[in-house]
Amino acid sequence: METQRKNKIIVILGPTAVGKSDFAVKVAEKINGEIISADSRQVYKNLDIGTGKIKGKEMQGVPHYLIDIISPKKAFSVAQYRKLAIDSIQNILAKGKIPIIVGGTGQYIQSIVDNISIPEVPPNQKLRKELEAKTNDELFKILKKLDIRRAKNIDKNNPRRLIRAIEIARAIGKVPKLKSKPNDNYQFLQIGLMASNEKLKQRIEKRIKKMLKSGLINEVKKIRQSGLSWKKIHELGFEYQYPTLFLRNKIDRDEMLEKMLIANYKYTKRQMTWFKKDKRIKWFTTEEKDLKKSRKSIKDFLLDH
């Protein structure tokens, strides 16, 4: 009996500032693809400069999905992302085009590639309010008591993730071990982009200085004026956390820049630690000769029956 042919999906991943978005647009143009973002902050409206969100001309007419879909006042879970990403994949395939998932949020990518079932636990606003008053250290200690296994794998500095993990653990006893199921519908090629530490540091510095020059401080002011608390803005990532402290006169401009750079370097290390666990990822540097090899890998994957 002939086995059902699986739909092919390209994944382009890697650390912050490595150049995934530009590369993905070029690939999409070549293979008749459309792009699904896998970035946990680009889902939010009005977080443009600080998330390095791809805009207008940079998209080169290539449709992009799951960017600007929710207010930053609302929580957005991996389960929600997975559902919307699968809907987007179906839409792209229905047009006879190739889905390309692009981003650096490992959990989002893994939820699709490994077909992971994620518990649907509704937000508990009362609990959230109580937890939001606590420090990251306090949240981490609470999670550790509830579920030591989840505590070992979580970003201790991300209050949103910590609160969500506590919320799930309180609701269903513990954060369940995510179960993956064989993916009967899709076949994936995961392309990882990487650069030397030195090159990545240069790219991060260039990117952050460009953000500040492009009006990041004003973007933070506007978000505040829209009704978001300083605490909530602080939780939106380093590019919002440190400008928030600067605007509240807690740090000066030089300190803000330095702290943003250090936090981003550390974050890229955590991203790479996550991605390196997945041995299916084919890694390429951002040198042109290597990018050429990666494009050949994509072409061969699409031609292989």
Image (cartoon, helix red, strand yellow):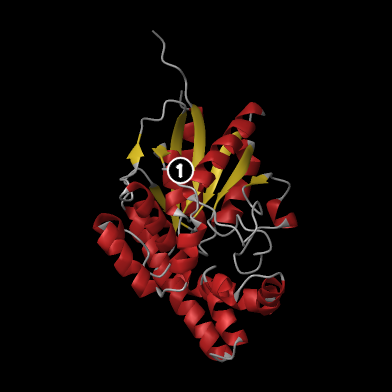
Question: Residue 288, image x and y in percent?
Answer: 52, 56
Residue 49 visible, this angle: yes
Nearest the viewer among 130 and 163 is 130
On the image, the x and y values in percent for residue 240 come to 57, 74
Q: Which residue is most to the front? A: 126
88 sits left or right of 169 in the view: right
Residue 241: image quadrant is bottom right
Image quarter for residue 223?
bottom right
* Residue 14 versus residue 121 in the image, above or below: below
Quarter location, residue 36: top right
* Mark 1 Cα shell of 10 Å, populated few (<14), some (14-19), many (≥20): few
Identify the amino acid type marked 1. Glu
Q: Quadrant of the N terminus?
A: top left
* Label total for image: 1
Closer-to-camera residue (251/287): 251
**Residue 166, image x and y in percent?**
38, 58
Percent x, y of residue 13: 47, 52
- The residue wearing badge 1 is 120
- The residue furthest top is 1
